[in-house]
Image: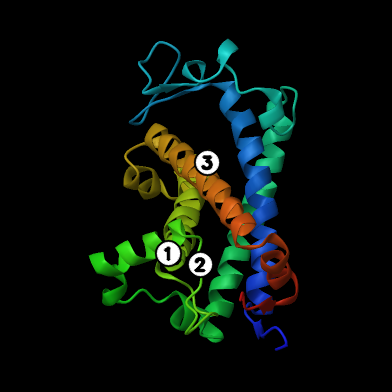
Amino acid sequence: MDRPRILHRHALATRLWHWVTAVSVIILLGSGLMILNAHPQLYWGQYGANFDTPWFRVAWVFDGGRVPGWLTIPSTYNLALARRWHLLFALVLAFALAAYMVASLLNRHFQRDLRVRARDLAPATLAHDLAEHAALHFHDPASPGAYNVLQKLAYVAVIFVALPLLIFTGLAMSPGMNAAWPWLVDLFGGRQSARSIHFIVAIALAAFLVVHLALVILAGPWNEVRSMLTGKWRVPE
């Protein structure tokens, strides 16, 4: 019987960033929902208050007009504590992302593994990758260690779009940053617009996490988690 083929799939920098980011995002989502409970409505533009017309109300989703405690950090209403958790892990997220980007440029992870080529975006390629995912075939037998097209598109969207947007819209909501970088608020169309974009991207990131975890389970959780702990990944038969 042939021995299982083992590949070294994830560099140390990728593994460290993955777990730091996973913890940070979970805490940021929970504390962010608690902060949202302080004023559970969202607006577009520069201003938004109780008597303005919001585009979103938490009351449309949850009875009582507040996000329930099982989704928030802390679980009981405490705006000051939620803000401390949020600021701390926002800094962790931002510096971890910057360090990961530098490391991935140096070790050529971005160029080697995440580079999206024109042929990757061809309708036939995308359709084939969707069909393979639907059949629970997540790896190319000819190059099992390579990222598939949907993986590359998802990771590029998260690393280069979603996370930077979260960071910069978060900065745009800070009064101190408003004074130092007023152009940042204007870039997002006003402070309330920045808050709305921050919320939308956070929800999109939460959806990504759900899909990501589901695919990890379908692909074989022990093999996938082990690869992100040790870097060693067993090629599926």
Which amino acid lies under the numbered mark 1 shown in the image of this protein? Glu
Identity of the residue furthest to the front in this view? 1
Classify mark 2: helix, strand or loop: loop
- Structural crowding at the residue carrying mark 1, measured as other residues with C-alpha within 10 Å and reported as few (<14), some (14–19) or many (≥20): some
> In terms of depth relative to the viewer, which is nearer, 231 or 56?
231
The C terminus - image quarter: bottom right
Q: Report how far apart the C-alphas of labels 3 and 2 lie in the structure.
A: 42 Å
Classify mark 1: helix, strand or loop: helix
| Among the 4 quarters of the image, the one containing residue 215 | bottom right
Which amino acid lies under the numbered mark 3 shown in the image of this protein? Ser
| Among the 4 quarters of the image, the one containing residue 64 | top right
Which of discs 3 and 2 lies nearer the camera? The answer is: 2
Mark 1–mark 2 contact, CB under 8 Å? Answer: yes
Q: Report how far apart the C-alphas of labels 1 and 2 lie in the structure.
A: 7 Å
Q: Report the residue marked by disc 3.
A: 174
Mark positioned earlier in the residue sequence (1 or 2): 1
Q: Report the residue marked by disc 2.
A: 138
Residue drawn 68% across the image and 44% down it: 27
Residue drawn 37% across the image and 15% down it: 52
Q: Report how far apart the C-alphas of labels 3 and 1 lie in the structure.
A: 44 Å
Which amino acid lies under the numbered mark 2 shown in the image of this protein? Phe
Residue drawn 68% across the image and 27% down it: 79
Mark positioned earlier in the residue sequence (3 or 2): 2
Q: Is residue 91 left or right of residue 74?
A: left
> In terms of depth relative to the viewer, which is nearer, 141 or 202?
141
Mark 3–mark 2 contact, CB under 8 Å? Answer: no
- Structural crowding at the residue carrying mark 3, measured as other residues with C-alpha within 10 Å and reported as few (<14), some (14–19) or many (≥20): few
Task: Name the colour scheme.
Answer: rainbow
Q: Position of residue 37 (x, y in %)?
A: 59, 23
Q: Report the residue marked by disc 1.
A: 132
Residue drawn 71% across the image and 28% down it: 70
Q: Position of residue 39 (x, y in %)?
A: 54, 21
